[in-house]
Image (cartoon, rainbow, N blue to C red):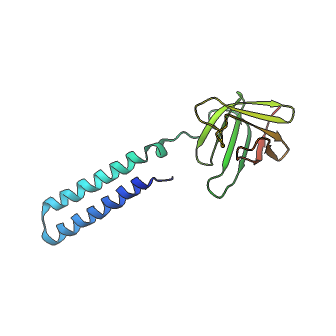
Amino acid sequence: MTTSIPALLIAATGFVLTFIFLVVFLRKKKLARLLHATLTILATTFLFYILNWEELTQRDFNRAKKKVVLTASREKLIGGVFLALYEDGTYELGNLRRVVTAGVFCVKADSLFLITTDTTHLPGASSKTSFIINKEELVEIQNTGIERLEVHENRLK
């Protein structure tokens, strides 16, 4: 999970304030400080969860719901690229954690064409790209930044 900087700042501030309220409660035995510590930790947890809502509820690949005909991926220094083609003619492309774009694909001879159908774009702000299909890899024809993907499973006809 990648956490945003504001969420980390809220968490750090909340835990510091909670610690301060607990220390004051233990030293001076003021019950109000214990209430403040409880409220601070609850508010911090709530805000941290709200700021990370998109990350926690992001959609995952549909591999369990659809029949996969090809999977390919490439490790990168940060993240990586994963491509899944499904039997119904759709695809999902993303990093190794979540879907970034989806659309339809078309196979002609030894070429694979990807076209986005949602409002997102492929890397390089493109709405389509194409690959040459080899036995063990997909080689991108247009340079959108994907370059090459290692084929893991291939049941294309």
As drawn, is 50 to the left or to the right of 146? Answer: left
Task: Work out whether 67 lies above or below 144.
Answer: above
At a point 38% along the width and 45% down the height, the residue shown is 50
Task: Work out whether 4 lies above or below 24.
Answer: above
Q: 22 or 116, which lies in front?
A: 116
Give how far across and how far down residue 129 sits, in percent.
Answer: 73, 37
At a point 19% along the width and 60% down the height, the residue shown is 34
Give how far across and how far down residue 43 sits, in percent.
Answer: 29, 51
Give how far across and how far down residue 117 sits, in percent.
Answer: 63, 29
As drawn, is 130 to the left or to the right of 17? Answer: right
Residue 10 placement: quadrant: bottom left
Task: Work out whether 110 lies above or below 98.
Answer: above
At a point 46% along the width and 43% down the height, the residue shown is 54
Residue furthest bottom in the image: 27
Q: 105 or 37, which lies in front?
A: 105
As drawn, is 119 to the left or to the right of 155? Answer: left
Residue 98 placement: quadrant: top right
Q: 85 or 118, which lies in front?
A: 118
